[in-house]
Structures are given as structure tokens and as C-alpha cells.
């Protein structure tokens, strides 16, 4: 049987990405259906992540499926020392699909190799968070009408931010130009720049963040600069207020610019930006529902045709 | 010094395997990697022998032994340029280089403490992405390591 697991975005083809986006679009048109009637989906959150879990569970509920699972490893047998393999195999007896979040890197890949049912990776440590990337792609597609030839500005923590790394990989099919705006300590790691060079992805790097730098942006993707990422707290004090987007910085923005953020934000987008028509991060989070409805249905073997005709 | 005279530095072998051109500084790693210390076969180990190619080299002769593909792939991790000579009746019947396989399963430890392979009773799995430079990528966490820096499982 073909393994329908959704573990990483790095190896998805262009066709597959566009296919899933089309499916997500069908769900945007009509998010409430009965297509998962009789299906049981397990959400196993070995590490808590409230918004990701709510988004997946809402997706199952709105499609008529049932949800079982746990929100925290302390309430599961993992806290008693059960192996991941045993937990996955046990739950596979009950559910048709497992959505899992784990603090260890590669956990979802391993689970997909031992489980007789498909696995969806809802985040494995600092490694991958592919459903976030799908909703980011869907939001770009929805707001720009295409994924081709976009100018994408990534701002903030480009060193540890896994969402920006996954986005690089997923966008390699679409001829983007990336602009990396980050403090020195959190700049894009060399391995990802090598990846860009290898795949012919254009990029520029900046340390300053102002209205002129971002004037050419189609997408401005903000991430949080976290204090705990700095080895030198003096350095943090110097840059903590530099990578904050303020409404006044959007005067020169292109009309089609949309501001995205994986959320939660703390202070990296000033609240005066919220009412600016370029702000789109709340709608972006809402798109998580449609993207995850598509990911779930694809993993369970439903096709785009099934969804269109449903 | 010719190969023949070199061979005379250590006892001749009737049947078995000669592992040649092992860098001297890797010799004892190869010994433990192949678990030679646990074998009951007749084994001769030559250390710091002269070598035109390497300056100094190590050589290992194991009587009445055939190495499996798995053992050879272990060898490739520490001594990728070694040569395996298969001896039958005092003659070299086959001479083959150690080939670096495309994948290494259960041989190398992942250096990432947050990798699932370091926290679950399971085999590690690496893809060899650049044989020339000896670059390995963990199948699970996708961290890259260089072969020269690897730690072996167990």
C-alpha cells in the first residue's frame, strides 16, 4: 500500500503542492462536509501546541470525523517510558490516521515507518512543521494569485525559525527571490544558503529593516526574535527593537503586499499595523483550517475529484 | 619496495582476507569495528608498515574468513580507501576496493541529541550524499555529518 503520510514538505513535487493547494481551495469554498463520516483521527501531542492541535481537530470536526488523543505527553503513557513505536502501534489499532507533534527530530518519519496507518507531522522539534508551510503557501497563493516569481522578505529569526527553512524548500519550484532580514546572530544558516545556490533560488541579505528595504516586497514574513536565542544579551538589547514592523514603515509598500506571521506574535508586529489592509496574519492562521482539511483528506486517500464532487 | 616483499613482512596466508592500505591512524578503529578482538580466527595485524601511497599503513590478515557486505560497509566509514584481497591457497583471487555504500544502517551514531534515533530503541539510518567528501545525512533528523567525525554505534 502506498504510504500516504505527510511528514515533510522538502520532497513534495510542484504538482503535489499545487494539487494540495487546489484541494485547500475547495475547502475554503465549503469547509463543512461529511466526507470523514465514520473516520477516527488521533491527535497525539507529545509536546503541547494548542493552536496547531485546535486547527487539526477543527478540521476533522468540520469534515464529520471523530477525534481521539492527548494534548500533552504527561497524560499519556510516554511519561511512563513507553517507546514511541509502542504508542503509535497501539493507537493504530483504534484510529484511521495519526496527527502527531513531538519534541524529537525525525519522530514523525520514524512513526510513518512503523505505523500501518498514515501519519501527519504536526511538528517534530526544530526539524519540520509541514502543515504550517502548507498554510503559508496557501496564503501566498490566495493573496497573490500565484506562487511564481514572488519577492518574499523573511524577517527576524532566520537561524532557528523552522517555518522559514521549510518555506525555502517548498518554494524552490516557483522561482522566488528571497530577502533575508536578520540580526547577525540569527542570520540564515549557511546550509540553507547552499541549498538556495544548489536549487537556483535567488536571495539577498540585509541587517537593516526599514521602509526602503521592504518596498519591493510581495510577501513580508515576520518571525519573532527571541531573547533566549542570544548567547550575548548585549547583542539582544541592541537588536530587540530593530526587527519590529510598524505601520509607518509601510508607506512605500506595493499594493499587493501581504504581511504574514506564523503566530503567536509578541511585539514584532506593532498593533498599529493590525488595521492596515496589508496585514494578513490573522486570516493566514484561518487558512490553517483549509490547508489541514486538505492534508487530512489526502492522507486518508481522498482525491481532489472526491472533494470537488462531494 | 614491491608488494611481494611487503607481503613478506607478515606471515603468508593460506585462505582468508587481507585488508590492505588502511591508514595507520585508523587501524585500531578498524580492528574494533570489525570485532576482530572477539574472533577466534588466526589474525595478523601489521601497524606502521611502509607504504608508497600512504607513508605508513596498517594491514590486517584474517585467516578463514569472508567479510559480509555489512561488515565491509562498516569498514568504509573509517577506511574508505582500503583494499580487500581475498586469498585462496596462497593466491590473491580477488582484489577489490572498499566501496562506500549509498546507505549506512545501524552503523553510525547521529550526533544530534534531539534526533529520534538517540531516544528510541531503533537503528540509525544515514544516506551518503557525497562519497568524495564523505558526507552523511541522517534519514530522520536530516543533520549532516562528515565521515571523518563519526561515532560508531555501540
Image: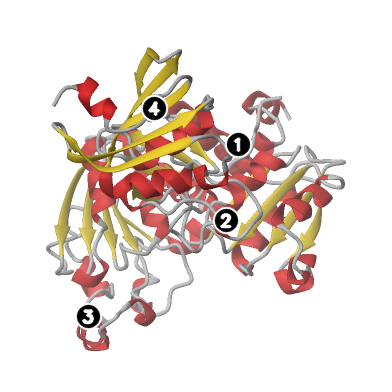
Q: How many residues crowd mark 2 within 10 Å: few (<14), some (14–19), many (20+)? A: many
Q: Position of residue A266 (x, y in %)?
A: 42, 79
Task: Report in which chain the residue with disc 4 lies.
Answer: B
Tell me if label 3 and label 4 are in contact, CB under 8 Å.
Answer: no
Question: N-terminal of the two: label 1 or label 3?
Answer: 1
Cα distance, mark 1 to mark 3? 42 Å
The residue labelled by disc 3 is A239
Asked whether A263 or B97 is in front, the reply is B97
The answer to whether marks 2 and 4 sit on the same chain is: yes
Cα distance, mark 1 to mark 2? 36 Å
Cα distance, mark 4 to mark 1? 65 Å
The residue labelled by disc 2 is B116
Residue A147 position by quadrant: top left
The residue labelled by disc 4 is B18
Task: Write the residue at 47% across / 67% down.
Answer: A263
Q: Which mark is residue A26?
A: 1
Quadrant where the N terminus of chain A sits is top right
* Front label number (2 vs 4): 4
User: Which type of secondary structure does the marked residue at label 2 adopt?
Assistant: helix
Amino acid at each position: 500500500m502506498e504510504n500516504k503520510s505527510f511528514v515533510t514538505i522538502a520532497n513534495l513535487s510542484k504538482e503535489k503542492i499545487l494539487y494540495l493547494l487546489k484541494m485547500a481551495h475547495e475547502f475554503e469554498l465549503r469547509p463543512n462536509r461529511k466526507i470523514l463520516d465514520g473516520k477516527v483521527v488521533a491527535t497525539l501531542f507529545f509536546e503541547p501546541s494548542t493552536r496547531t492541535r485546535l486547527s487539526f481537530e477543527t478540521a476533522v470536526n468540520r469534515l464529520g470525523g471523530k477525534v481521539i488523543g492527548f494534548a500533552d505527553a504527561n497524560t499519556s503513557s510516554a511519561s511512563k517510558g513507553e517507546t514511541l513505536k509502542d504508542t503509535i502501534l497501539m493507537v493504530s489499532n483504534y484510529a484511521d490516521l495519526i496527527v502527531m507533534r513531538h519534541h524529537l527530530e525525525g519522530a514523525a518519519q520514524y512513526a510513518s515507518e512503523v505505523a500501518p496507518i498514515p501519519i501527519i507531522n504536526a511538528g517534530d522539534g526544530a526539524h519540520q512543521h509541514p502543515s504550517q508551510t502548507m498554510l503559508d503557501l496557501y496564503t501566498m497563493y490566495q493573496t497573490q494569485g500565484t506562487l511564481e516569481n514572488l519577492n518574499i522578505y523573511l524577517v527576524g529569526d532566520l537561524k532557528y525559525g523552522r517555518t522559514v527553512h521549510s518555506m525555502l524548500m517548498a518554494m524552490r519550484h516557483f522561482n522566488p527571490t528571497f530577502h533575508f532580514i536578520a540580526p547577525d546572530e540569527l542570520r540564515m544558516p549557511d546550509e540553507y544558503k547552499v541549498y538556495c545556490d544548489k536549487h537556483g533560488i535567488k536571495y539577498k541579505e540585509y541587517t537593516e529593516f526599514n521602509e526602503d528595504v521592504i518596498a519591493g516586497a510581495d510577501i513580508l514574513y515576520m518571525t519573532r526574535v527571541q531573547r533566549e536565542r542570544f548567547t550575548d544579551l548585549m547583542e539582544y538589547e541592541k537588536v530587540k527593537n530593530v526587527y519590529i514592523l510598524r505601520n509607518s514603515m509601510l508607506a512605500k509598500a506595493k499594493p499587493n503586499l501581504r504581511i504574514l506571521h506564523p503566530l503567536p506574535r509578541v511585539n514584532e508586529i506593532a498593533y498599529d499595523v493590525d488595521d492596515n489592509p496589508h496585514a494578513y496574519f490573522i486570516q493566514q492562521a484561518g487558512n490553517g483550517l483549509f490547508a489541514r482539511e486538505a492534508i487530512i483528506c489526502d492522507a486518508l486517500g481522498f482525491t481532489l475529484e472526491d472533494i470537488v464532487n462531494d | 619496495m614491491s608488494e611481494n616483499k611487503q607481503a613478506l613482512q607478515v606471515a603468508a596466508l593460506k585462505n582468508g582476507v587481507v585488508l590492505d592500505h588502511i591508514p595507520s591512524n585508523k587501524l585500531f578503529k578498524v580492528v574494533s569495528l570489525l570485532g576482530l578482538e572477539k574472533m577466534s580466527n588466526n589474525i595478523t595485524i601489521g601497524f606502521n608498515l611502509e607504504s608508497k601511497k600512504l607513508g605508513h599503513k596498517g594491514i590486517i590478515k584474517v585467516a578463514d574468513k569472508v567479510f559480509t557486505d555489512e561488515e565491509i560497509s562498516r569498514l568504509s566509514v573509517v577506511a574508505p580507501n582500503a583494499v580487500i584481497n581475498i586469498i585462496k591457497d596462497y593466491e590473491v583471487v580477488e582484489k577489490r576496493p572498499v566501496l562506500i555504500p549509498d546507505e549506512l544502517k545501524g552503523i553510525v551514531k547521529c550526533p544530534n541529541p534531539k534526533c529520534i534515533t538517540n531516544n528510541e530503541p531503533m537503528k540509525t539510518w544515514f544516506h551518503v550524499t557525497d562519497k568524495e567528501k564523505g558526507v552523511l545525512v541522517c534519514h530522520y533528523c536530516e543533520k549532516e555529518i562528515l565521515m571523518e567525525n563519526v561515532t560508531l554505534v555501540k
